[in-house]
Amino acid sequence: MRILVVGGGGREHALCWALKRDAPDATVFAAPGNPGTAQLGTNLSIDAVEVGKVVEAVKELRIDLTVVGPEAPLAAGLADALRATGRPVFGPDRAAARIESSKAFAKEVMQRAGVPTPASRTFDTLAPAIGYIHRHAEPLVVKASGLAGGKGAVVCVTRDEAARTARAMLAEGAFGEAGREIVVEQFLEGEELSILALTDGERILLLPAAQDHKRLSEGDAGPNTGGMGAYCPVSIATPALLERVRREVLEPTLRELAVRGAQYAGVLYAGLMLGADGTPHVLEFNCRFGDPETQALLPALPGVTRHLVEIATGGWRPERTTLDATRAAVTTVLAAPGYPDTPELGAAIIVPRDVEPGTLVFHAGTYRDPDGTLRVHGGRVLGVTGLGDTVWEAARRSAAACELIAYQGKTYRRDIGWREIRRSGAGAARG
Ligand code: GLY
């Protein structure tokens, strides 16, 4: 089987790795890939959003399955274009990808489908947005409706801050096109969960719950980032809660998308906030695998990629409704100095061979010089996944491997998975 993975981050390296683990005879290509995917297959110098070029490559290279990693090519219609030429693809059509590419659309779908989500209103002009903000209790969340690279949701502690943020988006061009429409949303307290489901639009296979750490600093402090680490499984995501998410969130959303003629085949990712009463409220949907969650989930799920193949090629009949993790997994992101605002690029990276037993190193923002030197090439540089019998053990392995990887200004959190470790009492008991 010849497989193309579209994208070039840690998620795509993890996808290539899992595809090769589950189908060792597969020939893997990545577009554009990174130095990590180059170790597993062939990188194509095509950007993920160059839809026409990706389709041409799929034809020329006789690709049997295309797996699309990021949201931007899905929002640009890559899956539609491939399906139009009869090529199997794992990823939703553009119409269904609007569940991520338009927060306003996602809210409309949820309201129509009766999915629990914080109260909100959508605006494309400033005066009514400001009026709404001043009539509602702070804190508020102001979101750019379009794709903003994971940075478009701003938690505003005061109404004045919310009004300034709305002005910046609607009147001053912050976030460009993505901010021409905004969603102003009630802020919810609680614990966040990432629930990823594989689906052909009808059947649903839930992956184990994961939790990511979006803030830069330990203790979940500091500015928001693309994600500083993730882990799975999460013990508060009980089978009863997962069943509730299926019934109250995923099924009604897919039904409502189907009513609107939107074809779903891929991952539907619900970013949830668990309220005080245990109700899973949807903060956002993503139309793709999460990053860094995928770097923790896939290593803990041997055999998962057969579902991707069957969803894309048709005839998928999963025997179960959930997949359980065979191990605990913790991914720590190693970032560039200055990340997220002004990442400093260019430092040489040393990754020792066999860095630490029970760990995997996924490349994200790296580049290899012609002389073989590996260099920092993006804000999030590497994802270091530790596996273990418990989250504590997996976290310890991930942290030990992070210590051994060297580059100037290496920036990372040493507390990924802290909530789960605290819940289990393991950190306190074992030091
Ligand atoms: N980890 C959050 C995301 O993938 O959007």
Image: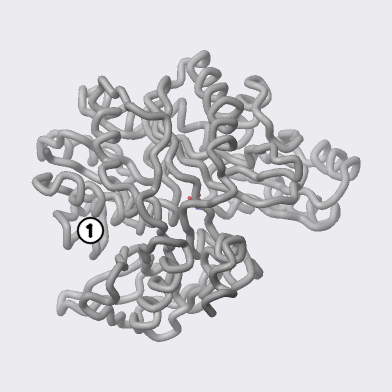
Measured as percent of width and height from the top left, residue 135 is found at: 90, 40
Q: Is 324 rendered above or below residue 162?
A: above
Quadrant location, the N terminus: top left
* Residue 41 image position (x, y, % from top left): 14, 54
User: Circle 1 sits in a helix, a strand or a loop, which is it?
Assistant: helix
Q: Is residue 220 above or below residue 348?
A: above
Judging depth in this view, the residue of 106 and 299 nearest the camera is 299
Which residue: 85% across, 52% down? 159
Image-based side of 36 in relation to 226, left or right: left
Residue 213 left/right relative to 373: right
Percent coordinates x, y for residue 132 in the rendering: 85, 38
Q: Nearer the viewer, residue 81 or 424?
A: 424
Residue 207 appears in view:
yes
Name the residue carrying label 1.
37
Residues packed near mark 1 inside 10 Å, few (<14), some (14 to 19) or many (20 plus)? many
Residue placed farthest to the front in the image?
429
Q: Which image quarter: residue 102?
A: top right
Q: Residue 269's spot in the image, x, y percent? A: 49, 39
Quarter of the image for residue 215 reads: bottom right
Q: Vertically, is 83 above or below 352?
A: above
Q: Quadrant of residue 380?
A: bottom left
Q: Is residue 278 left or right of residue 331?
A: right
Q: Is residue 224 visible from the viewing direction of this image? A: no
Q: Residue at x 53, y 63 (%)?
A: 417
Q: Residue at x 76, y 35 (%)?
A: 119
Residue 300 vs 266, above or below: the answer is below
Q: How many marks?
A: 1
Looking at the image, which is closer to me, 22 or 118? 22
Please state which amino acid type lies under the numbered disc 1: Thr
